[in-house]
Amino acid sequence: MNQNEEQRLNKSREIAEFCIKCAEEKLAVDPALLTLGSDSSIADFFVVASANSEPQLRALTSFIERQVREVYQLRPISGDIDSNAGWTLLDFGDVIVHLMTPEMREKYDLETLWGEYGKRR
């Protein structure tokens, strides 16, 4: 790994860990950091956390998006922010944040699905 790649990966990890802290601050349930690394062309890190209600899901999504924008001057490349679906996604490029209701998290079980690549924090 060259120096630029290492710096990019370190910055991505910093952003992912910041998203975890934001989720914890807003009382998200069981936030997890999955390290995908070079095995994935999708992202280097997934952040996965649960919200106990649709209002909490909306609040988590807004809070994380706002905090990342303020601290890192970074806006999501794309995102599905329909919290009525029980799952919101914030795509920050190398870091993708998945916020879900417990039912959606159990149904899609990203930690197991990506377990071959991911390492839980």
Image (cartoon, rainbow, N blue to C red):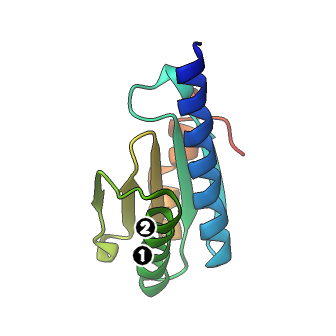
* 41 in relation to 121, above or below: above
Whole-percent x and y of residue 107? 46, 56
* Tag 2 residue: 65
The residue nearer to you, when weighing 76 against 111, is 76
The residue positioned 47% from the left and 64% from the top of the image is 99
* 106 in relation to 59, above or below: above
Q: Amino acid at mark 1?
A: Ser
Disc 2, SS:
helix
The residue positioned 72% from the left and 46% from the top of the image is 121
Q: Tell me where residue 25 sits by quadrant.
A: bottom right
* 74 in relation to 64, above or below: above
Q: Amino acid at mark 2?
A: Glu
The residue positioned 46% from the left and 57% from the top of the image is 98
Assign the N terminus to one quadrant of the image. top right
The residue positioned 51% from the left and 69% from the top of the image is 67
* 108 in relation to 113, above or below: below
In the rendered image, the residue lying farthest to the top is: 1
Whole-percent x and y of residue 75? 35, 58
* Tag 1 residue: 62
Circle on res. 10: none
Disc 1, SS:
helix
Q: Are marks 2 and 1 in contact (CB under 8 Å)?
A: yes
Whether residue 29 is visible here, answered yes or no, is: no
